[in-house]
Image: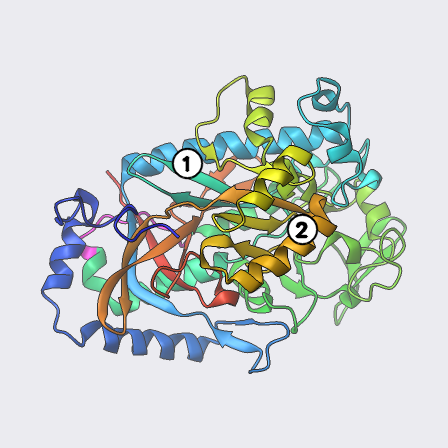
Amino acid sequence: MPDDRTFYNEMLDENGGPRPAYASLAKWLEDKPPNFLSKKSRDAEMIFRRLGITFAVYGAEEATERLIPFDPIPRIISAPEWRRLSAGIDQRVRALNAFMHDVYHRQEILRAGVVPEELILQNDAFLPEMVGFTPARKVYAHIIGTDLVRVSENEFYVLEDNTRTPSGVSYMLENRETMMRLFPELFQSNRVATVEKYPELLRTTLESVAPDSAKSTQTVVVLTPGIYNSAYFEHAFLADSMGVELVEGRDLFVDSGKVFMRTTRDPKQVDVIYRRIDDAFLDPLTFNPDSMLGVPGLFDAYRAGNVTICNAPGTGIADDKAIYAYVPDIIEFYTGQKPILNNVPTWNCSRKEDLAYVLDNLEDIVVKEVHGSGGYGMLIGPTASKREIAEFRKVLETNPSNYIAQPTLALSACPTHVASGVAPRHVDLRPFVLIGDQVRITPGGLTRVALKKGSLVVNSSQGGGTKDTWVLED
């Protein structure tokens, strides 16, 4: 594990003084009585409980609905830092969309040998049903969550690209709303970029990719698996915030190649579906025949150009962890530019030489499932027991192609309210990107924080919390 003396402290410099972006916040914290943050944390928890801001934990013995712990001390990003980050994110998402269009059409990147053909064509995330089809505006991933970590003043790394159904934006919005209720004076003394327009911009983005046949007033819906899904709160929140209907598969049907929504009056044609269910469950006639969550005939209506599905089926090929190692090459192939943001060095365990290195260094590295998420199915070597490492070694040797490995990064840390007061805790960042008629990047994003001292695991399902993320304006 990174030594606590070596990580980059985002608030304090090497002399213990506040960095410029945090100067105002540091002074504000110094002026507050000892129990101030504890009281505000309890107030925040009451707000979250009243609003029902929860997430579900699958397979847990305790109650399945939990509150995500909220830290009342904001994470601050300066305007110059954000300009660099947003430029790198913009470059990355454009390249990934170009990559998706290519692999489902001419496959020039495969013919050029930049990405191994078998890594695409034999990948479960690659959908042959999408070959030859071009979505509206050539956009495949309309909503992307790019996970970033910081390791020094000027070094940021992309951990992964969430191009399927990224979640967490509702917590970003509710965190800001809660902070503005609790600390209005902080916002008066700091020029913080707004995030409140995200639902409006999301709807604008979705409407911009409606089929050409759509009427001037497009009908947009959010398709959810239902109330038992871990992100159901977010599905309902976004539908309500956009002023559109939240639907389940049974609320929709296909007639004459078009998708309709059942209403108390006549059926209403649907133009855009913001889907929050996985590819396999979208349409039982095309994918998993046992699916009760999707809409029979939906994919044919989509291929006919009568409805737009956001994100497009098959977008998982761009955020597959086996593809991740090639993203710098993908960026250069489609843009002719070097990546602005770094990738984490990655070993692909399907390669014999990479596997040999990983097996020899399990105590020092992080190993992840190619299709894993939520912090599950991974090994953090520096914090794992000898027994856990031995058990993981057997799994890795049995199915090496299912894993990648990366060095353990010394993630940056932010001031965080803990039982003993204020202490640094490791964080990551998920900015949210909207892609339709243009690329729109919400300033900041969702900061996730590892609340346990020394922990690098920020996932809410693994005990992590969240913070409001401030981007300061010039």
Query: At which x and y percent is residue 414?
Result: 29, 54
Q: Residue furthest bottom?
A: 62
**x, y percent for residue 83:** 35, 34
How far apart are the two marked residues, 1 and 2, measured between alpha carbons? 36 Å
Which residue is at a point 85% across and 53% down the rendered structure image? 287
Identity of the amino acid at label 1? Ser
State left or right for residue 155 relative to residue 474: right
Mark 2 neighbour class, 10 Å CA radius: few under 14, some 14 to 19, many 20 or more = many
Magenta segment: does it hold 342? Answer: no
Given contact means CB atoms under 8 Å apart, are the residues at marks 1 and 2 in contact? no
Q: Which residues are magenta?
A: 188-196
Q: Residues within 10 Å of mark 1 (few under 14, many from 20)?
A: many
- Type of amino acid under label 2: Leu
What is the chief secondary structure element of the magenta stretch? loop
Identify the disc placed on residue 86: 1
Tell me where residue 158 appears, x and y as whole percent.
Answer: 48, 40
Whether the magenta-drawn stretch holds residue 190 is answered as yes
* Residue 134 visible somewhere in the drawing: no
Q: Earlier in the sequence, mark 1 or mark 2?
A: 1
Position in image of residue 23 (x %, y %): 15, 49
SS assignment at label 1: helix
Q: Nearer the viewer, mark 1 or mark 2?
A: 2
Residue at the spot of label 2 = 396
Residue 436 shown left or right of residue 449 in the figure:
right
Q: Work out whether residue 387 can be spotted.
A: yes
Q: Which mark is residue 187?
A: none
